[in-house]
Image (cartoon, rainbow, N blue to C red):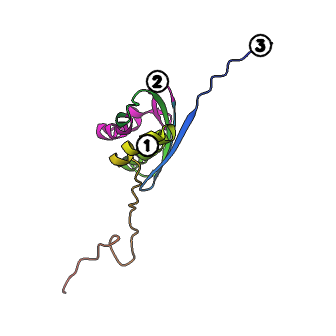
């Protein structure tokens, strides 16, 4: 009879939302790999500033390079998706260690940004922009 060695990797999960984007973040103890939609973070998000923003919760909690992070994100544009990943990552860190709550909360990473695009109304150019007034 052969014994199989089971390596249990505990997963930590967090859902993040921003505008119309939704990110599902899976985090497990590892080497610091960051994959977004089965692509490395550098390939998926081109803007350096957005990548730096995504690393802020890890730097604030001193967990940089300690987790493998896998993200599924859909909807919206690159900025909205980055915001959703940030929110989901912060929630996953909170699931890993509840003591991180004051750090993440004071930095504003746990707050859901509820702003949405206002719908366009009929008789107008955009949501609020009216047609140009002409006296004649």
Question: Hey, which residue is sitting farthest top in the picture?
Answer: 1
Report the Cα–Cα distance between label 2 and label 1.
18 Å
Q: Closer to the camera, 30 or 45?
A: 30
Q: Is residue 18 magenta?
A: no
Of badges 2 and 1, nearer the viewer stands 1
Q: Position of residue 15 (x, y in %)?
A: 50, 47
The x, y position of residue 14, in whole percent, is 51, 44
Disc with the residue nearer the chain's start (3 vs 2)? 3
What element does badge 1 sit on? helix
Compared to 34, does 76 lie above or below?
below
Comes first in the chain, label 2 or label 1: 2
Residue 57, picture quadrant: top left
* Residue sticking out furthest to the bottom: 136
Q: Is residue 4 above or below residue 33?
A: above
Tell me whether the residue at label 3 lies in contact with that at label 1, contact meaning CB atoms closer than 8 angstroms: no
In reply to whether residue 42 is colored magenta, the answer given is yes
Estimate the x, y position of residue 112 in percent, counting from the top left. Answer: 42, 54
Determine whether label 3 and label 2 are within 8 Å by CB. Answer: no
> x%, y% of residue 107?
33, 46
Q: Which mark is residue 31?
A: 2
Quick one: 55 or 124, which is closer to the camera? 55
Q: Which residues are magenta?
A: 29-58
**Relative depth, front residue between 133 and 68:** 68
The residue carrying pointer 3 sits among few (fewer than 14), some (14 to 19) or many (20 or more) residues within 10 Å by Cα, namely few
SS under mark 2: loop
First in sequence: mark 3 or mark 1?
A: 3
Q: CA distance from mark 3 to mark 1?
A: 41 Å
Q: State the residue position of label 3.
A: 2
Mark 1 surroundings: few (<14), some (14-19) or many (≥20) residues within 10 A: many
Q: Local crowd at mark 2 within 10 Å, few (<14), some, or many (≥20)? A: few
At 40% from the left edge and 53% from the top edge, which residue is drawn?
111
Q: Which residue is mark 1?
A: 90
């Amino acid at each position: 009879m052969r014994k199989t060695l089971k390596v249990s990797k505990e997963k930590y999960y967090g859902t993040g939302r921003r505008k119309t984007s939704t990110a599902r973040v899976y985090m497990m103890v590892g080497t610091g790999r960051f994959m977004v939609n089965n692509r490395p973070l550098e390939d998926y998000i081109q803007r350096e500033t957005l990548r730096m923003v995504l690393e802020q919760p890890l730097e604030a909690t001193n967990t940089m390079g300690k987790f493998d992070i896998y993200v599924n994100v859909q909807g919206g544009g690159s900025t909205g998706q980055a915001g959703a990943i940030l929110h989901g990552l912060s929630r996953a860190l909170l699931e890993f260690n509840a003591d991180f709550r004051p750090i993440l909360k004071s930095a504003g990473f746990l707050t859901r940004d509820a702003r949405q695009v206002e719908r366009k109304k009929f008789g107008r150019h955009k949501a609020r922009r009216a047609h140009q007034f002409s006296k004649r």
